[in-house]
Structure formats: C-alpha cells, structure tokens
Amino acid sequence: MLRMSTLFLRTLREDPADAEVPSHRLLVRAGYVRRIAPGVFSWLPLGYLVYRNIENIIRDEMDRAGFQEVHFPSLLPREPYELTGRWTEYGDTLFRLQDRRKGDYLLGPTHEEMFTLLVKGEYSSYKDLPLVIYQIQTKFRDEARPRAGILRGREFVMKDSYSFDIDDAGLEQSYQRHRDAYIDTFTRLGMQFVIVSAMSGAMGGSASEEFLAPTEVGEDTFVRCTTCDYAANVEAVVTPKPAPLDYSLVSAAHVEKTPDTPTIAALVEHSNERADLARSDRPWTAADTLKNIVFMVKGPDGVESPLAVGLPGDREVDTKRLEAVLQPGVPRPFEEPDFAKHPTLMKGYIGPGALGAANSSGIRYLVDPRIVTGTRWVTGADATGTHVYDLVAGRDFTPDGVIEVAEVLAGDSCPKCGSGLALARGIEVGHIFQLGRKYAQALGLKVLDENGQLVTVTMGSYGIGVSRAVAAVAEQSHDENGLIWPREVAPADVHLIATGREDAPFAAAELLAGELEEAGLRVLYDDRRGVSPGVKFNDSELIGVPTIVVVGKRLVEGFIEVKDRRTGERTDIAIAEAVPALLEVCE
RNA sequence: CGGGGCGUAGCGUAGAGGCUAGCGCGCCUGCUUUGGGAGCAGGAGACCGGGAGUUCGAAUCUCCCCGCCCCGACCA
C-alpha cells in the first residue's frame, strides 16, 4: 500500500517554467519525474511504478509472442560499430568515451551489432532459425536538441528485438509476428495508435512501418486517408501518377520577357498583370508553374554532382524526403560558386531546356510524379528575365525520371483510393523494420542451409520506446486537472482519500484500504491528517489514478463516494459493499 | 549550427545603480480550520549562474565564460 503520508512525493501547484508539452508539465507537477540534465530524467516512486507497469506489459507481450529476452551492456566497445561503419556514420549523436588506456567505447544508441555478433557466436545452422531475441535497455543518443521532457531524451529506455531468418519468407513471418504483438501491446497500454508506412516503394511496401500515437505535440507528420485505411509517414507517401493528358490543342511553347520574376510569386503576379499572357478561364496560380531546383549531391565516393528537381511551383522540396530518397547520397543546396561552374543555369530562371541527359549540360533532371506527359507549364527559359509558356511535358521536354520529394499537402490524393489525405502529428512509439542482410553481411553472420551452403542470415529490427510510451500515454490521456492513467499502467487502481477532522473516516479508510489490498487491488491511500480536502482532491486528480474513493462526510450514514477520474462521475456506495463494488469498477 | 528568450531560496517570480534582496507556493513551530489548493502569529531557507571590470556603492552597467528553455537545422 502506498501511503501519502510517507510517500516520497511532492506535487507542484504551479507549472514548471521549463516544461511546454502537457506530458512533461504534468509528469513533473505530479511528482513522477525530475530533470537531471537536458534530456536526462530521474523517475520518482509514482513515475517508476508507471514506468515499470509499461515495461512489464511490453515484456509480457514479447514473451507471449515467443521472443526471448537477453540483456546487453550499455557500455560497448568500438570495434563492432567500426565494422558496420556506424562508429563514424552515427556522427555526433553517438556518445563516445575512452577508458584509462585510451580505448574507445560508446554508449549504445541501438544494438544491431551486438545482437548480430551474439547470434553469430552461437548459431551456425538453418535448423536454429527462426530466432527472435529482444532486450529492454537504456539507450544513449546525444541528440542535437532534446525536447519535450521524456518524449525525446538523450537517455531513454527502448525495447529492441531482432529477428533472424534464413530467407525472405521467414523474415516476413517474423515481421508479422512483431506487428501482431505490437498491436496487442499498444492496445493494452491504452494508447490510440496508427500504423503508418515508413518507407517508400523502393524498399518494398511492407518493409517498414511505424506505430504512431496521434497527438498535436508529436514530432512525426503522417497522412491518413479520409476514406480508406491508407496511412503513411509523410516521408513515405506515394503520389499517384496522373494519366497522360491530350495536348493536341495546346499551342506551341513561346518564350516571353518577364523582367524581375526570379520567384514563383513574382512570376504568377507578372503573368496575371500582362493582358497578352492572361488566361481566359482563370488567373494563373503557382500550381501552373514548373519550379526547377538544383542540388549538389555528394555520393558515397565523395564526388559531388548536380541534380535538378522539377516540381509544381506551389510546392516546396521536403528536405527530409529528399535525403531519404538520395541515400546514401547527401544533398546540399546549390550555391553561388556552383552556379559559377554551371553557367547554363540562370538562377531564378532555370528551365528544362538546360536540364536532363538530352541537354549538353547533362545535369540529371528528375521531376515530381504530377508532371506527366501532356501537362502544360510556365517555367524558366534559361535566360534572366525570361520564361517559357505552354511548355508541354513529353512534347517540349523529357525528364530523366521521377522523384518523390515534394512536400505533402492536406488534400493530396490517396494513392490507394484517390480520396483526399489529411495531415496529422504523432509520436513514434514503435517501429518495425525488415533490415535484410546489411548487418549480417557486415559482421559475417552466416549459417549452413539444408544443402550445406553458407548463406547470410536476413534480419529484422523492431523497437518500442518504453520510456517514451509513458509520456505518450500521458500526452493522450490527461485533462486540465492532471493525468488520467489507463488502469493497467496506473500507479494504483484506487486512490483512497480520508477527509475530515475526526478519527472515524481515517479508521474506516484504513480498514477499507487493507481489505482492498487483500482483494487484490493496488491502493494509494491519502492518510495525511491536517491536509485540507481540497488539497487531497486536487492531488488525486493530478496524480491520475483511475478510481478515486472518498471516505468523508457521508460516512456517518454508511456511505463512501466513488469517482471516476476520467468521466468525473461520482456515485455513493454503502461502505459495507465497498470491496465488491470497487472490484467491479476496477474490472 | 542559425534565430529567439532566460539564469534571483526546493518551485513560481518581483527588483533595471542607492537602506537588511521583496512576494506567492512549499517547508518548520503554535493556535484555529477540515468537501475543492484554509486563517492568524512566529520562523528557517539566497555566494542574485561564474569570472573579470567600471563605480564611493553592482542582482542591476560593461566584457568574457558557463548553463537552461523555445523555434528551426539535425536525429531512432
């Protein structure tokens, strides 16, 4: 039994000045966590109870799925991460340290290498597979900017599992087992979640999915179809390619003088102001223009080459998507010295005429999927102060290919059913990912197959943010008065309050607390004498135990009050029937 | 890394050259109070982020440093 009189807890009446998001504010105010350093938090008794409940639910579901728990150190040697290239690739995000002999170590940001090597050391036959092992472990990432309290820390707890299979079919099965287990896990955590595609088609449609907990403070933006069940991270949205248009009636392309129009906005304004250029049907909009943006892309070999991207003028390039698509290449904006080296590119007036394999410049030219054959554009004419009108894709220019990097806007078409997409934000609480053979290859994890041939094992990796889940649940489940925990993760089933100056309510509450515990309920008992009822009520709402029981003024008539934290609904019940009644309330 | 804001008691804050650094919450003592963050009285608690400087005098002005928060860049 938790007694408020002795519980190591101090609730705060005011919001902490450094907390912005609700989960952070409330977890601090309710005395669940305290900040130690940026992105580093301590768990206090109530917080640690909730944390452990969540951890145990996750562990339980993993075990139920038949996965086996192991535990690696957080302190890891450099060598394995050197072998996979991540010692350098991880960059500043990796916490590195040296021992007294100047040996390099790191604090594990994730453990693919260690799992791969562990299995390599033990297994060597296809008969041993499939295998799934997992751990629940503290991870370290020196985030450039930790934020939002527990949601994005530099030290956090993650459940990470890894599957090992002989072939793609096995990997697919291991992946599905995780997907199912995750659905059960997050359901049990009382969380609302959506499963979204996390990678574009290039890696295979089901290769990677994220479990997002929708909330405004989430860091991930995702789309959801307003009609069908399609959902995807914005980085993974597939733009449906429109059918080619008939352009037989479009007049020939014509170059026009358009002084001082280096931006799309200026071009649109100019076009609408010119009587000879104005459209008969409607004014020009940015969507009628074709914007061409050039990047320098550094390949894995370190060589930089230019890449031009064409997209409708009403859209921006989403740099996250661009980087994802170009991996392992790294893009950077085209700058003045680059323009100097490529004199055919006129800043602000770049057009397809100077781009593409067909052109002398040979600059690779990829366009947004919306730019299909027959679409008609206003775009740069490759000379300062000039644009070309009625330039038709497929007739007047032919790009080298398609690239999916435009920002996604609400109302864009669903790739599955064509309806409009809605944008929303979510917290990434889980990620399942078919890794393939990358790590097995790099670290030499091979087994003999049934023909006696050595084959490289294929892997999957599957994460759940355990500490993050605490904050995600808090984020989704609170009101202006405090936290509202789903029962299974709550620090207690019943928050029992005794009020009044007399001994009677305290004696009755004490007795009831014992009986409830006896009956198997977890009880947080506010046995503080001399604390006013208002304080107790407010604390109970802040702390967020799902059922609040008050032994107070109606005790003389033999009644106690039962309040549902979420709905606020109160009912008086006879104290004699309290135990069975509360057992029922607590299901 | 770019932009913005901020460091004063455990928490939230006032003080913008001049008395012993003020207030609220919390904490301690006593009395009163006990169904929605009680009242009165008394008390403890501060190297005003650090260093250097200007000045008769610095929390307050100047310079340097350190740290924190927010937005962005970045990022399982």
Image: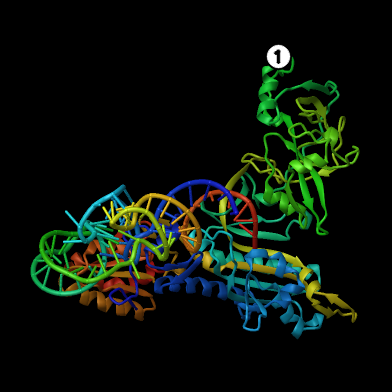
Question: Where is A58 relative to B52, above or below?
Answer: below
Determine whether A421 is above or below A386 in the image: below
Residue A20, percent from left and from top = 44, 54
- Residue A39 in view in this figure: yes
Q: Residue at x 90, y 80 (%)?
A: A451
Taking the spot 80% from the left edge, 67% from the top edge, the residue there is: A168
Question: Mark 1: which amino acid?
Answer: Ala
Location of residue A352 in the rendering, given as x and y in whole percent from the top left corner: 83, 34
Looking at the picture, the colour scheme in use is rainbow
| Quadrant containing the C terminus of chain A in the rendered view | bottom left
Residue assigned mark 1: A275
Residue A131 in view of the camera: no
Front residue of A452/A320: it is A320
Q: Position of residue A497 (x, y in %)?
A: 27, 69
Q: Residues within 10 Å of mark 1 (few under 14, many from 20)?
A: few
Furthest-bottom residue in view? A122
* Residue A436 pos. (x, y %): 77, 67
In the visual, does A262 lie left or right of A482? right
Q: In front here: A65 or A210?
A: A210
Question: Residue at position x 56%, y 51% from top?
Answer: A425
Q: Is residue A376 left or right of residue A211?
A: right
Give the number of marks.
1
Question: Which chain is disc 1 placed on?
Answer: A
Is A303 situated left or right of A496 in this image?
Answer: right
Viewer-proximal residue among A163 and A181? A163
Relative side of B52 to B57, left or right: right
Q: Secondary structure at mark 1?
A: loop
Going 30% across and 59% down the picture, which residue do you hit? A570
Q: Quadrant of the N terminus of chain A?
A: bottom left
The image quarter containing residue A252 is top right
